[in-house]
């Protein structure tokens, strides 16, 4: 039996209606290898990885520096327990991560496995901190409508996308949803709130919804005035996607909790980090019952740390962020051209190298049809409803941006003209 048949018999894919997946007409692409921004399927066809393998990849696939760092660590050990022991690479990674926030209070790192657990961990810390530091009534959260923070039950209760999360609300925590800063300001029971969570600068899953400039800074000021903790979910925006290493740096905001995952290992291995302030951290010191009883088996996995450290090295060696500035400008130029020239494009929303091209149509499923058509023109990406998402690895070149945007344009024309 071939791998596609086995997949259809035994595998279950995320966010996928398996009824459709399993249908005989559906021929899923099996990815076998990758090189730079290119993915190669089982039939030898090559495609640009237009969404960075679901928003994770940073420097391209099969990068020699990151590959070598993982191989070097493999020669030593693949995993050892972080419960009761440390290891050198985790120490190094923690200090490298907090070094992006010098002279701030954000100096402590708690490792976990993925975006959801990074958020989960921030939530539990936020609640436990209040309970044991004299504010046991602050037990609720505020999140933004349309926000996405992961799929585990805690993180899911912060999710503001109704289709995914509404049915689970009654099992979760008390979370209030606001549309914007004005709604937050008018919220009546701020004294019950432990923390506010936001995807800074841009909500990814909400069809690439870009916040107004200055919003994040205002939010930070407001949360400080109200003594509410601010959790920044930079799981998607972290590691250069928005043009700076972290999105919060664009508005000089230092949060109380900073959640990192997807790009942390440059898209190589599952790993996450929740950065917290020393103020929060100190609220857990003292008696045994003040301990943060939380952890996962693979916490601070050494292979993941090796990949993450190598990725930070590559940022320096390749001057990635300097290059990104130019690429952002070029992508903006190409997409504004597309928005102006193509009558089927309703709007292009963009923040750094994160872009959403919303199609002008009332029909469901057009976005998916366009993405399927784009495969013919060497582009793999996924839509969110009828918004085509482009979020290429930061290593993409100008000519690859040309191929990517041309593929979208052609595909739109094939489906809608
Ligand atoms: C992807 C994502 C998550 C969840 O991360 P996983 O690694 O999929 O658990 C959380 N927050 C944001 C903003 C994301 O984009």
Image (cartoon, rainbow, N blue to C red):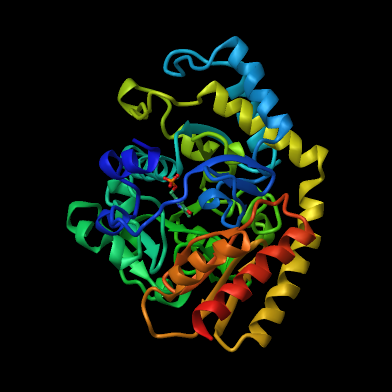
Query: In the depicted view, which residue is nearer to us: 236 or 280?
Result: 236
Q: Where is residue 68 in the image (x, y as percent from the top left)?
A: 69, 24
Residue 127 or residue 340, whichever sits in front = 340
Could you tell me residue 200's position as x and y percent? 55, 60
The residue lying toward the viewer, choosing from 309 and 78, is 78
Residue 141 visible in the current orientation: yes
Q: What is the x, y in percent for residue 22?
A: 28, 52
Q: How many labels does the image show?
A: 0
Task: Please name the residue shown 44% across and 85% down the image.
Answer: 361
Can the viewer see residue 208? no
Q: Is residue 96 above or below residue 126?
A: above
Residue 47: x and y, percent? Answer: 61, 53
Locate the N terminus by quadrant.
top left
Residue most extreme to the front: 1
Answer above or below: position of 383 versus 85.
Answer: below
Q: Which residue lies furthest to the left in this view?
A: 170
**Can you tell which quarter of the image residue 405 is in?**
bottom right
Q: Residue at coordinates 79% horizontally, 39% vertically from top-left?
A: 316
- Asked if residue 360 lies left or right of residue 74, the reply is left
Please identify the quarter of the rendering in which residue 101 is found. top right
367 or 358: nearer the eye? Answer: 367
**Quarter the C terminus occupies:** bottom right
Quick one: which residue is furthest to the top in this view? 76
Q: In the rendered view, would you say 133 is above or below 205?
A: above
* Residue at image location 51% in from the left, 51% down from the top: 54
Residue 316 shown left or right of residue 246 in the figure: right
């Amino acid at each position: 039996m071939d791998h596609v048949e086995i997949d259809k018999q035994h595998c279950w894919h995320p966010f996928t209606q398996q009824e459709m997946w399993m249908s005989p007409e559906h021929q899923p692409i099996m990815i076998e290898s990758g090189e730079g921004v290119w993915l190669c399927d089982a039939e030898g066809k090559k495609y640009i990885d237009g969404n960075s393998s679901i928003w994770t990849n940073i420097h391209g696939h099969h990068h020699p520096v990151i590959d070598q760092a993982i191989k070097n660590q493999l020669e030593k050990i693949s995993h050892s327990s972080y419960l009761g022991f440390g290891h050198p690479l985790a120490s190094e990674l923690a200090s490298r991560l907090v070094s992006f926030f010098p002279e701030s209070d954000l100096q402590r790192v708690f490792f976990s496995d993925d975006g959801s657990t990074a958020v989960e961990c921030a939530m539990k810390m936020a609640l436990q901190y209040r309970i044991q530091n004299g504010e046991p009534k602050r037990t609720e959260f505020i999140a933004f409508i349309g926000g996405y923070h992961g799929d585990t039950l805690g993180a899911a209760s912060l999710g503001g996308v109704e289709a995914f999360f509404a049915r689970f609300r009654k099992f979760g925590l008390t979370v209030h949803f606001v549309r914007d800063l004005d709604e937050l300001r008018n919220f009546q029971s701020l004294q019950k709130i432990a923390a506010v969570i936001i995807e800074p600068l841009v909500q990814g899953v909400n069809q690439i919804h870009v916040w107004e400039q200055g919003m994040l800074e205002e939010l930070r000021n407001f949360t400080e005035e109200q003594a509410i903790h601010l959790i920044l979910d930079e799981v998607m925006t972290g590691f250069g996607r928005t043009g700076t290493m972290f999105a919060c740096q664009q508005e000089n905001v230092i949060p109380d909790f900073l959640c990192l995952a997807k790009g942390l290992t440059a898209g190589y291995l599952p790993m996450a980090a929740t950065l917290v302030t020393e103020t929060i951290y100190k609220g857990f010191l003292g008696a045994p019952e003040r301990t943060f009883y939380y952890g996962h088996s693979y916490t601070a996995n050494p292979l993941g740390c090796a990949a993450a450290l190598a990725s930070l090295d590559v940022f320096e060696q390749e001057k990635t962020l300097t290059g990104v500035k130019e690429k952002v400008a070029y992508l903006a130029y190409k997409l504004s051209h597309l928005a102006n020239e193509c009558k089927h494009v309703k709007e292009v929303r963009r923040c750094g190298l994160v872009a959403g091209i919303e199609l002008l149509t009332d029909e469901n499923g057009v976005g998916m049809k366009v993405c399927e058509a784009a495969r013919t023109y060497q582009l793999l990406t996924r839509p969110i409803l009828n918004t085509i998402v482009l979020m290429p690895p930061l290593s993409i070149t100008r000519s690859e941006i040309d191929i990517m945007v041309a593929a979208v344009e052609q595909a739109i024309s094939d489906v809608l003209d």
